[in-house]
Amino acid sequence: MHNFIVLDSSILIDDLRTGCHVDRILALDGVLRNSSVVLAELWRGVLNRADRKLLVELERDHPTLTPTKNNWLESGQILARIRNDKGFEQGKLRDLHFDVLIALTARSHGARLITSNGSDFELIRAYRDFKLEVW
């Protein structure tokens, strides 16, 4: 079985802006996979031709994992539980929705999710366990 790794947009954005994670990314012991949700978040923020080129290369170089119907349905159930337990407003739940989808998709493939957004993903992991590494 492969040791799949999914990088969250927080890692990729930080690295693209500053190069702060390049050594750690190069040293990873696993097979990188994209998340279609992460790619969508990155495409939403594209500002110039260089950004577009990097995203096209990222898509070309690493296969993409996509949420299933069950991932989508479970994400809504998890968010409802979080709303009931934490009293979060709809805006915060919307902000969390993509992160829940990223986590559930990674979990479905046995992938380790690497993020610098520890607080939101630790919250999600309290509702559905998945492999998480916070940088």
Image (spheres, rainbow, N blue to C red):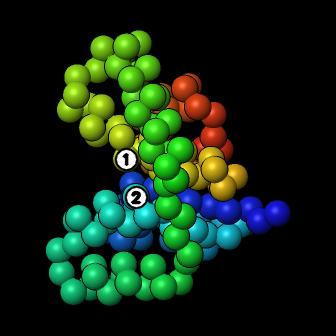
Determine the secondary structure under disc 2.
Answer: helix
Residue 11 occupies which quadrant of the picture? bottom left
Q: Amino acid at mark 1?
A: Phe
Query: Residue at 45% across / 44% down in the picture?
Result: 72
Residue 46 image point, x, y percent: 22, 72
Is 57 above or below relative to 19? Answer: below
Query: Residue at 51% across / 45% down in the picture?
Result: 71
Is 108 above or below relative to 73? Answer: below
How far apart are the alpha carbons under marks 1 and 2? 7 Å
Is 78 above or below relative to 33? Answer: above
Mark 2 and mark 1 in contact (Cβ < 8 Å)? yes
Q: Identify the residue position indicated by label 1 in the image.
A: 98
Mark 1 surroundings within 10 Å by alpha-carbon count, few (fewer than 14), some (14 through 19), many (20 or more): some
Residue 8 image point, x, y percent: 46, 56
Q: Quadrant of the N terminus?
A: bottom right
Question: Does any portion of residue 135 appear in the rendered image?
Answer: no
Residue 66 image point, x, y percent: 50, 61
**In the rendered view, does 9 fall on the left or right side of 130?**
left
Residue, far right = 1
**Closer to us: 55 or 15:** 55
Residue 27 occupies which quadrant of the picture? bottom right
**In the rendered view, does 135 fall on the left or right side of 94?**
right
Q: Amino acid at mark 2?
A: Val
Q: Identify the residue position indicated by label 2 in the image.
A: 37
The mark that comes first in sequence, 1 or 2, is 2
Residue 87 image point, x, y percent: 30, 14
